[in-house]
Amino acid sequence: MSTISYRHSSPIGRIPISSVSPVVDGGRWRAKAFVGEMVPFSAVVFREGHDALGVELLITSPAGKTQAIRMHEGAAGSDTWYTKAVLNELGNWSFRIQAFSDEYKTWHHNTELKLEADIDQELMMLEGIRLFTNAASDKTRSKSSAQLLVRLAETLSDTSLSFETRFKAAESASVLSSISKEPIRNLTTHSDSYLIQCERTLAGSGAWYEFFPRSEGAKFDAKTKTWASGTFKTAAKRLPAVAAMGFEVLYLPPIHPIGRSHRKGPNNTLVAGSQDPGSPWAIGSAEGGHDAVHPDLGTVKDFEKFVKDANALGIEIALDFALQASPDHPWVQSNPEWFTTRADGTVAYAENPPKKYQDIFPINFDNDPEGFYQEALRLLKLWISRGVRIFRVDNPHTKPVNFWEWIIGEINAEYPDVIFLAEAFTRPAMMHMLGKVGYQQSYTYFTWRNTKHELTQYLNELAHTSSAFFRPNLWVSTPDILVPYLQFGGVAGHQIRAAIASLAGSSWGMYAGYELVEAAARPGADEHIDSEKYEYKPRDWAAADKAGTTIAPFITKLNEIRKSHPAVGQIRNLETHNSSHDSLFVFTKHLSAENSPTGKADTLIVIVNLDPKNVSDGEIQLDLWKLDLPYEVPFKVTDLMTGESRSISAKSYVRIDPTEQPVMVLRVDRDK
């Protein structure tokens, strides 16, 4: 009979440690974090017998400073230990789990039982004397702790005192504090070390806005029936309003020359008129390619000034990075090998059967990988030199994943502050892999999650299942997407979706016109009619403000709450709670005092009526232990949307009329 030998890359330690988190695919890729983010850590740790365990997180900053953070045991029998840490320094952090036999806790437990049973009392005193004397002689222990343990050993040796008195000395506040800071360890065991990449805050937490520069300031001359495109100069006039609403990132669709061949007309029609500007994603013409600026928008210097004007208002510019070309792109002539030639000799255009995109040639990444990879790298560095530090990447899931791992790695090695947002609405495996190989953020399926069940399931997945490698950016609308909920939800529907996206997500985004409740769909499609992708769409913002037909004040309030409450800018602290009504969706964001940058606990309870047409009422049921609140004690809250205060408890009745205010944002007033 043959014997099968199982060999492991590293033998199990004296104390087993497994299921360490956050770890991505066994450490193949670094877990993600951003400056100021509260990161949860956990591991399964157990041992034979009944002796007590101690478990610590050893986390080392990029500067090399290591901190030991005590972990706490979870549900009885789970053997899972937890703690949280806030990362506050850019770069690669490393961490490992340290487990040990907790000698003090074992001695204390055994002594307590034996004193109660009136057995081995003197023996337990002797065991304590030996334990504390040996610990005091440990050269790694601080002098003050060693002196305290010596005095404790002396007290345990004092036979003039009762066993109970001597034992109580080992339970004094000073002893417990010292033991907590410097445990008496034995059989110390370490897990493998793992990396966490900590990036700048905007990589994981921010408010995004999208507009087309060509529409901002565009004018139509009724006499000549001609359009004058908006420019960077006219678009800059919209920047103060974007900043006033509280947005931190302005995303621009492609700003490059647009091809003429097969240019799309209004509503994606196949024939364009002479005045139709075409889709910005059909990049490249005689005026240039990805390194050029569309002449209708201005010059490169105009763009650079636009970036500086935005920066001065606290806004960063995100530029679209779309690796595709119109048939008129200079690459088609200079580098035909970067495209796919079909059997009939024609160049393959983009297709997603039955859809056809004759105005776009996709890139072939395999014919000349060295040449095209270097060209893509050149383009990114060029726009970085022009002031761009954020790129929204169009359809990254249609390009090779190893290309993204390479190019994002190259860019972030030289420019660690550069952020990439993946516009990938595709299979979860691909979306997740893009996050693992380097993408700082991704679009999500939030837009299509509208019911209480759907939101609960999906947001919990984003917050707790995939958050180590996949950072969600919750967009409520895009030029391509107008779901039925928004088509028919009216003002309340738009407010509801914005409230959930901005307060449940750490990052969220909004396409221009959302604040005007633009909701007319193209017949038979879940997208805007008269899409801005194919035509100019100037908006009269001043008239909307004057008429009060904008929800911009509501959006502004949401972003103000985000900036005033650090708990909102996190994603891993999201918790959903139960309610008795299918249209009442309840979630919380909480930071404990020790994890909050203000040094004070920050807790928000958000209650949303998901039905934009009808009143919803019922009982909310809060899991108060998740918020560090006692279960049986009522507590005071203030609704940040109305300013009203009230007392609530774990179970409270609420009634929400969406025509008045479809969302409650309750701040827990712990000091009141």
Image (spheres, grey):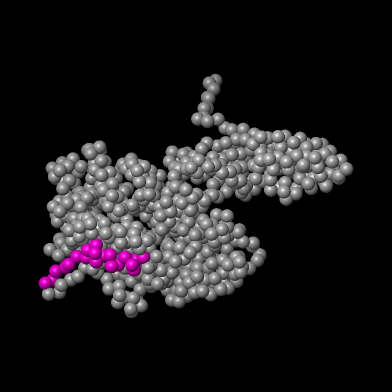
| Percent of width and height locating residue 329 | 17, 50
Q: Nearer the viewer, residue 406 or 73?
A: 406
Residue at far front of view: 143
At 22% from the left edge and 65% from the top edge, which residue is drawn?
Answer: 230
| Percent of width and height locating residue 517 | 34, 71
Residue at far left of view: 224
Residue at far top of view: 1
Left-right relation of 522 to 125: left
Task: Classify 308 as above or below 237.
Answer: above
Q: Quadrant of the C terminus?
A: bottom right
Q: Quadrant of residue 631?
A: bottom right
What range of the chain is rendered magenta? Answer: 224-243
Task: Classify 463 as above or below 639.
Answer: above
The reply to whether the magenta stretch includes residue 227 is yes
Left-right relation of 325 to 106: left
| Percent of width and height locating residue 494 | 39, 69
At 17% from the left edge and 42% from the top edge, which residue is drawn?
Answer: 335
Q: Nearer the viewer, residue 11 or 651?
A: 11
**Total marks drawn?**
0
Q: Nearer the viewer, residue 92 or 326?
A: 92
Q: Quadrant of the N terminus?
A: top right
Q: Is residue 241 visible?
A: yes
